[in-house]
Image (tube, grey):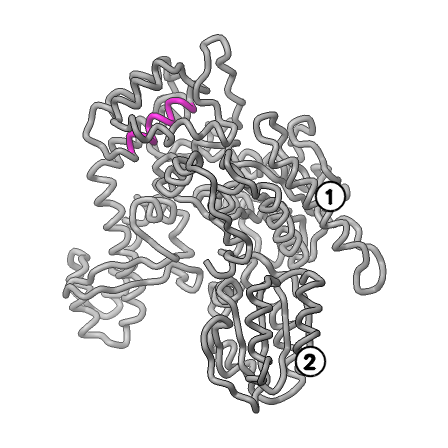
Amino acid sequence: MAAGSDHGLKRIVWKRIKDTIIADCKKSEVWKILILDPFTTKILSSCCKMSDLMEERITIVEDLFKIREPVPEMKAIYFMTPTSKCVDAFIADFKPKPKYKSAYVYFTDYCPDDLFNNMKLYCAKYIRVCKEINISFLPQEAQVFTCDDPGAFRKIYSPHSQEKRKTLETLADQLVTLCATLNENPGVRYKKDDKMVNAKTLAELVDDKLSKHYELDDSGKKKEKTPAQLLIVERGFDPVSPILHELTYQAMAYDLIDIQNDTYKYKSKDGSEKQALLNEDDMLWVKLRHKHIAEVSEQIPKMVKEISASKKQPDGKITISNLAQMMKKMPSFRKQLTEKTIHLQLAEDCMKFFANNVEKLCKAEQDLAVGSDVDGAKVKDPMRTLLPVLLNPFSKHDKIRAVLLYIFSVNGTTEENLNKFIQHVKIEDEREFILNWKELGVPIITTPSLFSRKPSRRERLEEETYNLSRWTPVIKDIMEDAVENKLDTRVWPHQSECPAAWNGSGAVSARQRNKPSSQDDRRTGSRLIIFVIGGITYSEMRAAYEVTQAVKSCEVIVGSSHILTPINLLEDIKALSKGPMETFTIEERSNA
């Protein structure tokens, strides 16, 4: 296994796959074929490499939906989602003529009886094993998971959607498999809000499904609640964090650079196209991803200088061209230097955007979000903060982001003001970018008498921050309050309670900056799992690591249907009011 995957969710998922799928297969010494659908391909590639599978006597990995050559002398392992599309493809492999000697079938989740009976009807004599292994989520990072369903946003929040309940049911099933994989039966709580009722619905569904799942464990006893909490919130609980320009490395890169499927594409100095995967196998990425861009830009050249010094290279200015020369001269150091070069290039790309316009935007954004300026003086007239942004030649999306931050800062504006903003930004035909936030329960148009008070935030005066990074995601307050047992039960009702581990004993403030304990030490304590309906941001993911590092007694895991970037979220919000949706079912999740 790659070092980056040696801990956290990825390690746990790979261990579960080894203990179930791989362990069964090892009972017979022959080499086997592994057949996956698109969703299980993502699961496997997130937590292991082909070399890991080869070690386990799996010789070929195939796509369930592609035409494959029959290999009648070999046994096949099927790891797939329990959908009719997958089951039909499986049956087609054995009817009328079998492609393989026998089949070992593993479903990500509960397989409905009708599909199971269909398989039995046509393929019973070929099936040696048929199991449900309860992994219906993607381990995105050590402490981050997704349900791999960006479409859930529209299915839950579009006023035209006919699939809200079905989508929440599916997310609940996926959350239960996460809990099962972690061997947790957590107490479930949700954020109560009259404008956001999906959190309550999902909490009820998850709690009900957890009870059924844990009715009997392997020893025939009911599994009691474990010292873990699952908190469920909706995206509307913090509309600011997904809209702000973030200046920590990972969040900034995914906002400003076109990174698709975690792949960063760039041009080397010789003009050739290159690409790099930004994941936990890259230990430099893991080390730098949550640092401020100012620190990253300082640290990478230092690292390169250390390498060049160790090889008696002249200690000149570090540029991409110098590195290219160095790599030609020292092939043995190519890998080490390539890693640094990728991040030097990515940091340079981020800084170009920052110098061009992001720096100018950030001061106004931070003042609007925090409600005070760098010196701590209250912003008395947010409109004066916003106007320079509207009058400058920023992009349409940047101006929309600033307008939204203004509206969020005053908890809704008048229709008259909103119309002026829309004219300024020239989005008369695209006002849905702003208006559709109401579907998430966020106030956009309010009459002056109804302006509501903003919720209070935790004091962070002693924390050192950069002037252009003063905002703290609301989810970090929630994490710290939960760990310290300070969540108000009127705002966070219990759908079900967990044992007394959460009575505040041993809980340590995330601001006391304890030394990070090792991942395995933390696992002996409690777990806090937070699920955000409607997408999670990179800054919120960072908060999970920060709180976990600061607190010895608890590991924080966060997840959602998908990970957000500001532009993708704006486009999703705009699309909410489009006409009746095409039917898009869970089946297509495994084929999207």
- Label 1 crowd (10 A; few <14 / some 14-19 / many >=20): some
Q: Secondary structure at mark 1?
A: helix
Q: Is residue 12 visible?
A: no
Residue at 58% in and 37% down: 233
Q: Going from the N terminus, do you reach mark 2 or mark 1 first?
A: 2
Residue at 74% in and 43% down: 498
Residue at 18% in and 74% down: 329
Q: Is residue 386 above or below residue 360?
A: above
Q: Position of residue 151 (x, y in %)?
A: 48, 47
Q: Position of residue 168 (x, y in %)?
A: 60, 44
CB within 8 Å, label 2 to label 1: no
- Label 2 crowd (10 A; few <14 / some 14-19 / many >=20): few
Q: Is residue 303 visible?
A: yes
Q: Position of residue 464 (x, y in %)?
A: 41, 35
Q: Position of residue 577 (x, y in %)?
A: 43, 34
Q: Which residue is mark 2?
A: 128
Q: Which residue is mark 1?
A: 501
Which stretch did the figure color magenta?
398-408
**In-front residue for pair 162/326:** 162
Would residue 284 be found to the left or right of residue 160 on screen? left
Does the segment drawn in magenta span residue 406?
A: yes
